Image (cartoon, rainbow, N blue to C red):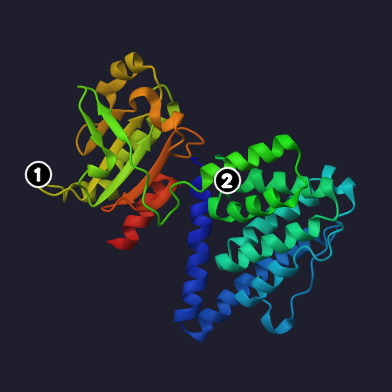
Amino acid sequence: MIIKLNFLLFVLTLFACVYLGSCTSSNTKDNNNNSLKKRYSAIEMKNSGNAFALPEIPLLIAGTQEGAIYLSKHYWDLFPFTDTQLISQPDITEQGFVDYIQLLNEIPYDHAVNSIRIMLDKAKVEHAMYNHLASLFEKYLYEPNSPFRNDELYIPVLENTLKSGLLSDSNQSVYSFQQEMILKNRPGSQATDFIYTLSNGDKGSMHAIESDYLIIFYTNPDCPTCARVTQEMENSSILKSIFSLNSSDKKLLTILSIYPDSNLDFWCKMLPKMPKNNWMNAYDDDTQITNNKLYDIKAIPTLYLLDRDKIVRLKDTSLEEIEGYFMKVR
């Protein structure tokens, strides 16, 4: 989860290119188009010496977002899906796949979804290759430590694979569970309510917390990464500036730290080390969040950002992404 920073920087760079390309001078547009051309040329050069051949982009749209969309539709046109030997050649298939994932992050979501569907439908000619590509989607879009992790792009993958009839019974079960969990608490939806319990035994409803923004921090005091993220949030100048606006009658930002496991004796011993100001440190009594699968907690720590109405703004996110969100809305 911590390595999401590289991905965030990648997206911010992309955003700058696309945004500035539409709002600044023609010289800037030319520079951005040249940058796009360089990225596509790099992909072509990387694959020119092996079996992963790429289609040519029409000259008039080369180096533009239209060219990126065209490439996304035709990226797999020349790939020999029936050649199962390529499954064991990651320098060809998996490297080409990684470049493809990067490309999907450069185009509008609807076009990315369409490209994924086109690719997986082409792969159905060979069951082994289809399952291999499905596993690569899982590795890069779903696994918690992937820098390219993207639940929204993984949803159309699950929709296609679960309807394909090409999965083993075990994979069908695994992907069905992933789909069930990934559809919970999506950005833009209202987060599922739950009851938290404070160290003194008082209980409360998450939805009843009055704060313009709420960070839900699923954490474990025995987790080194959790301790590091806790320290980073304490030291964040952006969060500190928002906390400074909190008052006794109005909260702009609150952090709700939730211990989702059952070893309460250990949690209580570690509680004095947790921050207090602007934090609510609580646990999940009877582990209802986990037992009832209320949230998709793939790994600890997990962060969510909610607004006043408990609408999910950022799901399973990072501190860097939360800071970036607040920089945009300030």
Q: Which residue is mark 2?
A: 179
Tell me which residue sits at (37%, 44%) in the image.
192
Query: In 3D space, how far apart are the residues under numbered discs 1 and 2 (Cα atoms)?
Result: 42 Å
Mark sitting earlier along the chain (1/2)? 2
Q: Is residue 173 above or below residue 221?
A: below
As drawn, the residue found furthest toward the left would be 248
Image spot of residue 230 (x, y percent): 34, 34
Q: Is residue 117 above or below residue 211?
A: below
The amino acid marked with disc number 1 is: Ser
In the image, 323: left or right of 130? Answer: left
Q: Tell which of 126 and 159 is nearer to you.
A: 159
Q: Tell which of 285 and 65 is nearer to you.
A: 285
Q: Secondary structure at mark 1?
A: loop
In the image, 58: left or right of 104? Answer: right
Tell me which residue sits at (34%, 28%) in the image.
284
Q: Mark number for residue 248?
A: 1
Tell me which residue sits at (69%, 58%) in the image.
100
Label 1: how many Cα within 10 Å (few below 14, some 14–19, many 20+): few
